[in-house]
Image (tube, rainbow, N blue to C red):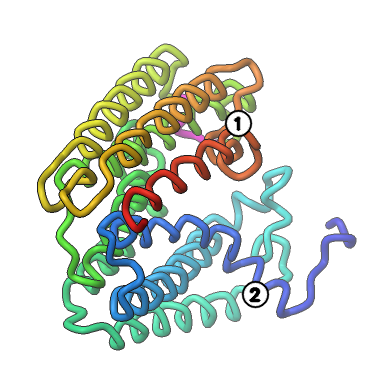
Amino acid sequence: MDTLRRRGPLRAVASAMRIPQWVKNSLLFVAPGASGRMFHSDVLSHTIVAFVSFSLVASGVYVVNDLLDRDDDQRHPTKRFRAIASGDLPVRAAWALAVTLFILGFVTPLRLDHPQGFYAVLGLYVAQSLAYSLRVKTVAVLELGFVASGFFLRSYGGAVASHIPVSQWFLVVVTFGALFLVIGKRSAELRHVGTANRVVLKDYTPEFLHSALTMAAGVVVTTYCLWAFDTSSTGLSSVKHDLLWIRVTVVPVVLAVLYIVRGAESPAGESPEDLLLKNRIVQGLALVWLFFLAWGTYL
C-alpha cells in the first residue's frame, strides 16, 4: 500500500463522500433559474434545501457503491487508493457513514412545502442508483440509460422542490444531454484505456458509440432549439423574457456539443466530464451560455 496516500479519519470520510462530485447536483438550479424565479426567496431556499438533500444522498450512494466494489477496487491500479478499498475507512465505519448520510438526506426535505413530490424523485434516484451498482452497470445500453437518468432526476428535482412547471422540451434536452455526456465518456474510455477499466465496455464498439453519440447530439441540439424558441409559459422565449438574448444561447450550446464530440472521438479520448471541469474553451462556452440566459431571463 502506498503510505503517502494514507488519510486520517476526517479526510477518509470526505474522500468516501466524493464531495467534488456534488457539482453534478448544480443541475437542481437549472429549472428554477430558467423559470426566472430563482431569486424569489422561497424558490431559492427550496432549491438550496434540495441541493443539500441530493448531495447527502448521492454521497451515501457513492459510499455503498464503494463498499460493494471494495474487492474489485483493491485490484485496480488507481481505485485501490479510494478510502474504503485502501482501508483508510473501515468497512463498519463506512456502513455507518452511509446510513447517516441517507438519514440526513431524507430528513432535510422536511423543510420544503409539500415535499411528497421531491421525496418521490429522491427515492427513485436512490433505487436506480443502487440497481445500477448491483447489476445494471454490466448490462450494455441499459447502463447508459440508468446513468443518464441520474442527471435527469437531479434536474427535475429542482423543479419539483419549488413546484415549478417545466417545459416538455426542457425534459427532453436534459435527458438526451445526460445521455450524450455518458456516451461520450464511454467512447473516451474505450479509446483511451480499453475494456480493462470497465467490464461493460467489452460489449461496445467504437462504431456503435460513434452512432449513439451522433444521435444524442442531434437530439440535444434540436430540442434545445425548440425549447429556446418556445413562446409558451414554460418556454425560454416566453413573453417575460428577452427573446434576442435567449435565442442567442443556441450558439454556445451548439459549439459546446461539437467540441465535446470532437474530444470524445479524438485519439486521446477526452472525457466530457474532464472537458467540462478542465477545458477552458468548454468552460468559456458554458459561461457565455449562462450570461446570455441570465441576461435574457433576469435583466
Mark 2: amino acid: Val
Q: Work out whether 103 lies above or below 64.
A: below
Residue at 73% over, 43% down = 77
- The N terminus, quarter of image: bottom right
- Residue 263: x, y in percent? 57, 23
Query: Looking at the image, which is closer to me, 11 or 275?
Result: 275
Residue 32 magenta:
no
What residue span does the magenta drawing correspond to?
Answer: 198-202
Instruction: Estimate the spatial distance between the alpha carbons at disc 2 and disc 1, rounded to whole Å.
Output: 28 Å
Residue at the spot x=24%, y=65% of the render? 121
Taking 154 as reference, is 135 above or below it?
A: above
Q: At label 1, which amino acid type do we have?
A: Ala
- Which residue is the site of mark 1? 196
* Res. 288 visible in picture: yes
Mark 2, residue position: 13
Viewer can see residue 155: no
Residue 35 spot, x, y in % from top left: 25, 58
Give me the residue at 28% from left, 42% from top.
175
Dot 2, crowdedness within 10 Å: few (<14), some or many (≥20)?
Answer: many
